Image (spheres, rainbow, N blue to C red):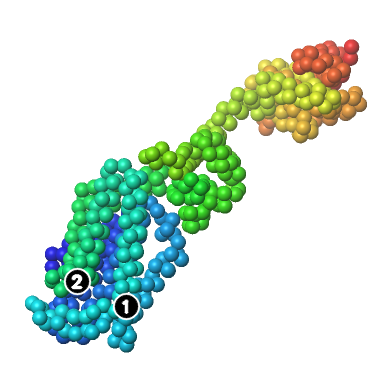
Amino acid sequence: MFLTLLIIGLIVYAWKNRSVIGSRYFLSTLALVEVWVFAQALEMAALDLPTKLVWANIQYMPIMLTPLAYLYLTLQLTRREYWLQQRWLKIVLLIAPVVINILVWTNDTHGLIRQNVYLNDSGLFPTVGKTFGPLFWVAAVYNYSIIVLTFINLAYAFQEKISIYRKQIVFLIIALLLPVISNLIHITGLNPFRVDTTPPVFGLSAIIISWGIFRFRLFDVVPIAHSIIIQEMKTGMIVLDDKGRFLDINAAARKMLNLSSERLIGHSIETELQGLPDLIRICREGKDAVQEMVFKSDETKYYEVSFTKITNSDNEFIGWLLQIYDITERKLAEEIVRHAALHDALTGLPNRNYFQILFSQELALAKMRRDVLTAAYLDLDDFKVINDTYGHDVGDRALVEVAERLKGVLRQSDIVSRYGGDEFTIILPQVGDDETIGQIGSKILETFKASVDLHEVSLQVGASIGFSVFPRDGDNINVLLKKADQAMYMVKGNNKGNYCIYKE
């Protein structure tokens, strides 16, 4: 009775914590043990052989499935979900339990599990007397093979873990070892009680596991750390083995990399991330690295990816830890700051400093191509009168309109900037003959003929323009701008609202 209540209590505990990693298989193990204990108790209480055989047959379901559930439990707790993801493996491992259970219920026709069955009432209570059939030993070999796999898994995990986790693994090993010893004593005939003591010993194992739960928080420390710290963190986390295969990935990384497939574990990073060659390249290089990357899907996102080698206690390389940080907000903020530093706050055009950078780049390109380039200096006529008459707010809005008109009349390859106050400078790549320059000057002046309507006032804004040509008039920024400025002042002095091409 105590054993039954204990197992039921643990089942309730596992059910309440069913969201924690490992609890599902722990719950399955406890449920199977409870069926085993209950069926054995009813077998012992029955007085006739047919009833005893029914309850003995029922016990074969937990006998064949409990080692399997415990294997799955240890695989999940030791973070080897790759094997749990293999559906074919689960199917293969279930074949023997299904076949053995069918043979148990049809034993009367073939005697492959039990032979020479009789009611033995020589002890304190009647038991089923029998000799084991040939396939019973097949079932035993299957069960012990599963147990050996479980021990191997726990041994590897013990070798890799730090002290507190090793204590947890020791509890798992002891909890498995006790029923194994009990079962060996029973099937070898060394048990003096003539009753299989494995189910009650499994109850003792449940007590040991429960001590691990409450003393070392067997299902809390690692799983909750994994589910909360890893699974719910905003940083993307990926664990790869030494061959570049997925061992673990959290929800954040799935979202960042747009990985919807649930079957990533065990798959190669090169197969699953073909669209991210930079990520694969870093993995191939085989050294720690930090790199910024741009991932494009529905929207452009910026990430910083950190590659760190994982080593075991002997400092042997065993895999990779990838940490992915979303730096989109930072990059956008940097872009805003960068844009503000390089552009005029009022018109959004390149400012004086940025214009000189762009001019240098275009001039270097023209020199490399042995091409021509034209610089223009534009000054608004009598703009001070507008500011003095209507105020600087109206003047600022007029400057914005001027910037829009210049961008609208020039080519996409041309560069226009607000050089300061009411002065604008322009770069015209691959333009150098006077006829083309004249056409461009006329187009710019034509766009100024329309009045600037600012709701409460309509203004007529005029402009004077001076042009200089590379390489005819100079081969550096200062000379070309100076000569364009001189040409512009010639217009100012003679006939405002016109253009002039610099001539020696």
Q: Which numbered dot is residue 134?
A: 1
336 relative position to 183: left or right: right
In the rendered structure, the answer to whether residue 269 lies left or right of residue 66 reads right
Q: How many marks?
A: 2
**Residue type highlighted by circle 2:** Gly
Q: Residue at x 19, y 57 (%)?
A: 207
In this rendering, the answer to whether 3 lies above or below 313 is: below
Depth check: 373 or 51 in front?
Answer: 51
Residue type highlighted by circle 1 = Pro
Nearer to us in this view, 192 or 48: 192
Residue 327 image position (x, y, % from top left): 51, 36
Mark 2, residue position:
189
Disc 2 versus disc 1: distance between alpha carbons?
A: 16 Å
Q: Residue at x 34, y 55 (%)?
A: 152
Q: Is residue 139 left or right of residue 374?
A: left
Residue 31 place in picture, x, y as percent: 26, 66
Name the quarter where the N terminus is drawn: bottom left
| Residue 55 visible in the picture | yes
| Dot 2 crowding, Cα within 10 Å, few <14, some 14–19, many 20+ | few
Quadrant containing the C terminus is top right
- Dot 1 crowding, Cα within 10 Å, few <14, some 14–19, many 20+: few
Q: Earlier in the sequence, mark 2 or mark 1?
A: 1
> Residue at image x 71%, y 28%?
403
Q: Residue 223 versus residue 500: which sits nearer the camera? A: 223
- Identify the residue at image location x=30%, y=70%: 140
Q: Say which element carries label 2.
A: loop
Would residue 445 be seen by someone viewing this image from the given angle? no
User: CB of mark 2 within 8 Å of CB of mark 1?
Assistant: no
Residue 455: image quadrant is top right
Residue 234 placed where, x, y %?
44, 43
Q: Where, by quadrant of the figure, is residue 434 drawn?
A: top right
Q: Position of residue 11 (x, y in %)?
A: 24, 62
